[in-house]
Amino acid sequence: MRDSSSRRTPSWFLPASQAFHQAGFSPPVDIYRLARGWLLKFDLAGVRPQDVEVVIRGCHVTVRGVRRDWMIEEGVASYSMEIAYNSFARTIDLPCDVDVAEVQTEFRDGMLLVRLELQRSDA
């Protein structure tokens, strides 16, 4: 008989929160069409700006990074976990090429704002 301590637990027996956290998450985004481009507003509450990367290729804007868990107090045990911690990625497909857009990013109140300003002929 095999030693039970050497067996791996199948993933379907993991608590739901652990299985969800291992898969990462996809942050919600609001997309606004502006007079001269686009504004993408990503919900990234709890994510540090240095843990985020914005990549623009053609008509695709990808935001990826990681939201890390941190403890408020030592010696606590989790009772319920609903916030996704792990790596994340979200790609937005826009109806035009934004490779040449002027890009500005800003973190404000847990939101990442990505402003893409196009040249007048591209808008």
Image: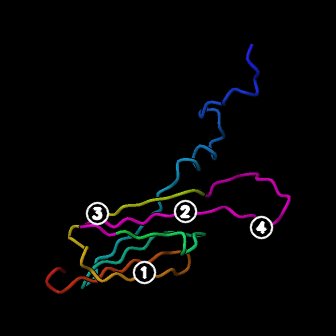
Q: Which residue is mark 4?
A: 72
Callout 3 amino acid: Asp
Q: Seen in the image, is 119 located left or right of residue 6?
A: left
Which percent across, then down, holds residue 116? 31, 79
The total of numbered circles placed on residues is 4
Give yes or no for residue 83 being in the magenta stretch.
Answer: yes
Q: Badge 1: few (under 14), some or many (20 or more) residues near its Cα, within 10 Å?
A: some
CA separation in Å, label 2 and label 3: 21 Å
Question: Which of the two labelled residues, at mark 2 and mark 3, occupies the earlier sequence position?
Answer: 2
CA separation in Å, label 3 and label 4: 38 Å
Callout 4 amino acid: Ile
Q: Which residue is mark 3?
A: 93
CA separation in Å, label 2 and label 4: 19 Å
Which quadrant, please, contains the C terminus? Answer: bottom left
Asked if residue 39 is positioned above or below residue 66 in the image, the reply reads below
Callout 1 amino acid: Thr
Q: Which residue is mark 1?
A: 105
Q: Quadrant of residue 38?
A: bottom left
CA separation in Å, label 4 and label 1: 29 Å
Q: Which residues are magenta?
A: 56-84
Which percent across, then down, holds residue 70? 71, 64
Q: Seen in the image, is 85 located left or right of residue 95?
A: right
